[in-house]
Image (cartoon, coloured by chain):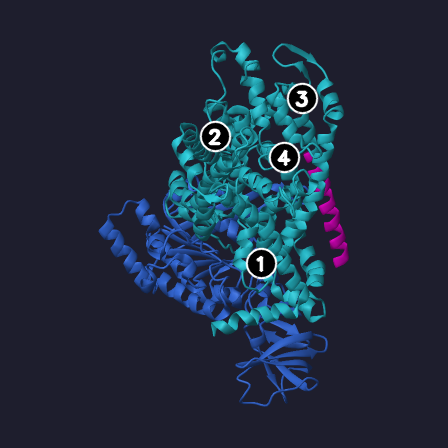
Amino acid sequence: MKDLRLVALRKEFAGRDRDGRRTLAVADVSLEVDKGQLVTLLGPSGCGKTTLLRMIAGFEEPSAGQIWFGARRIDDEPPHMRDTAMVFQSYAIFPHLDVFENVAFGLRLRRVAARALRERVERVLELTGLEALAARQPHQLSGGQQQRVALARCLVMEPRLLLFDEPLSNLDAKLREQMRVEIRELQQRVGITTVYVTHDQAEAMSISDLIVVMNAGVVEQIGTPSAIYGAPANRFVADFIGRANFVSVDVLDEHRVRLAGMPLAVRPHGRRAGERATLVLRPEAIAVDAERGALAGTVRRAMFLGSLVEYLVEVPSVGPLVVDHPNPVAGRLLRAGERAWLTPVAGVGTLLE
Amino acid sequence: MRAHAVPATLRRLARDPVWLALVVAIFVALGLFVAYPLVKVLLTSVRDGDAWTLEHYRIVAERKLYRNALVNSVAVGAIVGVVGTALGYLIAFVVTRTEVPAKRTLHLVSVLPIISPPFVTAVSILLLFGFNGLLTRHVPWLADSSIYGFRGVVLSQLLTFTPIAYLSLRGVLQSIDTTLEDASFNLGASRWQTFTRVTLPLSLPGIAGAFLVVFIESLADFGNPLVLAGAAFPMLATQAYLEITGSFDLARGAALAVVLLLPSLSAFAIQRYYLARRRYVTITGKPALATSRLVGARTKWLLYAGVLLFALVVAVFYAVIVVGATTRVWGTDYTPTLEHFVYVFQVGFDAVKDTLVIAVVSTPLSGVLGMLIAFAVVRGRFPGKGLMELGAILNFAVPGTVVGIGYILAFNAPPLLLTGTLAILVAAFVFRYMPVGIQSGIAVLRQIDPAIEEAARNLGANSLTTFRKVTLPLVAPAFFSALVYAFVRAMTAISAAIFLVSASWNLMTVQILSQVGSGRLGVAAAFSVVLIAIVVVAIAAIGAFVERMGGERARMRI
């Protein structure tokens, strides 16, 4: 039994678009999530990911489709009966209650006895590193602390489902990386099934068991981070997740293509021999060398990024390719205008369907 | 250290003569037109000829008439405060938290009493429930009851002041992020629990603030009690007026004014120094995209029905005014006629003209002065800044009756002989209706990055040029809302003005009251209709003007 199931979930809004069609925010999304998994809804703003999350929480009513928690269908239940706990983008900390009372809010509604309530709140405050701040008022908290309160308020409910709506977008870069590690560790420790909305692909890659890539209300691909990165289903996914070079090739057989006259092994695909196709080559899947390689090109731009150098190399008859050269301190850096030799790594490129 | 600090700010001030002149001028003006009249009232109340005395207060404390007046005023204020705030919260709640039809119309009807003289509903009540009232005559069980006294005043003030509570609570409810309500649902709270544990506690400081404002307004209200209180139900503001104009007892009137001042100032102090710090400002990541789900369908229509009822009553009361203005003799001869309007434009035309002149002169003055003071308070660094702000907004809390008495006491002798002139009315209106503009100006200025003004200074503009070329355009919206407010209040003012009018300068509001006093309700109603029409046209005109200004600014930006 899957822990969370969405069946052909659909949301139309009252307004109409320029062609007179009803605005479609979410188009027939189906999804299955195992107990304890963290699934990310990833996509650009306006792709419907937040609407999908709000339908799961009960803040939006689906136009069609079903939502199941295990064997229980819940899409007709009001939000407060659903046993989900959501971390809002704005945190939505109650400004009139201190940290302890914010965390205790849901338990008080359930009339948990005073002793048990105190124990549970204190346990969660400790878990989230907030024990020293229990008596603080929300306006005395930093952004990261407010984030933790929002999380603690959810965890204390021991909900069936944890929901996150872009929880890190109001934090600075350093804190964002720290918090996403914390969220992932906490989630794994408590083992609660989690749906997490973000537009940040690095965030999604680093914390997810499963990523749902969405665009314009439609699911583009569902898969593990490595599957989505390694074998993107289409151009949108390839482009949105990480960096990608798109190269025109001729298909030779089911695992080889011809790139600029040279054969190259790629991942198995369903295209027929003789067809033109688009190959996705990640920048790190192309080796670069000053003296020898498969393709000759000219360095247009070199960007030193610390752990690697990112080159933009113009290859005649192929086009500009972005290429990563790791650990640049060891070797000599190429400069703009110099000749560079590129060798695509065999067997890792993906053909777009 | 401290001995050094003050001269340093003074030296900085001295380096910028425009600033210095501005600050000194504002202090002089506030001292003369705000503080001095109040001091005069206080002094007069404790003087008997050349001797100091508390005799006037002893009489006020001992005589039943005055004690009753105090009790009546405070009781009416408390009841109108509670019920008016509750009604205002209901309307604000329906407008901000539900999807219902005709919201815009409801809003407009609900604020209608704000742009009309504060006692128009009293005239309307007389037309319906007075001795010759429509309902008194035709509804048997109303025939023997008198509307004069407690019931009439409370009813009339409720209709007059509920809109004020509504507007302020609408702002409060709008500023509460509905995400907080979502969070509460999400944690398992029902609608009722969410309302009682989140929405209501978050709006409590705003509710308390609205209550105090309505309380202050009710206590200071003059027109409604004068029309409806009657002799058996004395109230403070009108009693002070009667002491002065009826018995020519300035000292006793002043003592009553001081008694009236105390609860008003206390309420003002609580509002300003206690509640203001308890407002919950919610900072949101993104605009709440959701509509609130705080009420279910059945509750929603129930609340909506309540709001509709209020709006309907307001609409009926104003319709009655229009009908009254076009009816020959209310109660006996219901023939339609325009004779009351003819009267207004012939016999009463001087009052119409005077009112317009006074409003048109005082409006820009109070707008500009208000913005200058807001600018000085937010951006200036000079000793006595807090005092300036307090002085500038103090008159908001001082009942008009007290201001009126203060002005006749202060400006009745050379060298400041202003009684009977245009100047005294203009001064009264400017300093009385400036505070709202100052407060919105301060709010807007605090949001403008000082770096923008510093850039102008850096490029060679002095403070006045900076204000004119940079700050003023930025605060334009606040400036024009201040203008609208000042104009509306100048057109509809009565409590201070009634002491200051003269044969050469009269006001429509005073005319309305005197027509009511002599029983000519038709003329009073016609005056009211003309006055409201002028106010509506003026608001539309100022609105159009703002729009054009906005358009020009948009073009300049391109």
- Disc number placed over residue B377 in the picture, else none: 1
> Which percent across, then down, holds residue A155?
35, 56
As shown in the figure, which amino acid type bears the numbered disc 4?
A: Thr
Residue holding disc 4: B492
Residue holding disc 3: B523
Q: Which residues are magenta?
A: B535-558
Question: Does dot 2 land on a helix, a strand or a loop?
Answer: loop
Q: Residue at x 62, y 41 (%)?
A: B412
**Residue B487 falls within the magenta-colored stretch:** no
The disc numbered 1 marks a residue on which chain? B
Badge 2 or badge 3: first in the primary sequence:
2
Residue holding disc 2: B235
Question: Does dot 1 land on a helix, a strand or a loop?
Answer: helix
The reply to whether callout 4 and callout 1 are in contact (CB within 8 Å) is: no
Q: CA distance from mark 3 to mark 1?
A: 45 Å
Q: CA distance from mark 4 to mark 1?
A: 29 Å
Q: Nearer the viewer, mark 2 or mark 3?
A: 2
Badge 3 or badge 1: first in the primary sequence:
1
A40 left or right of B27? left
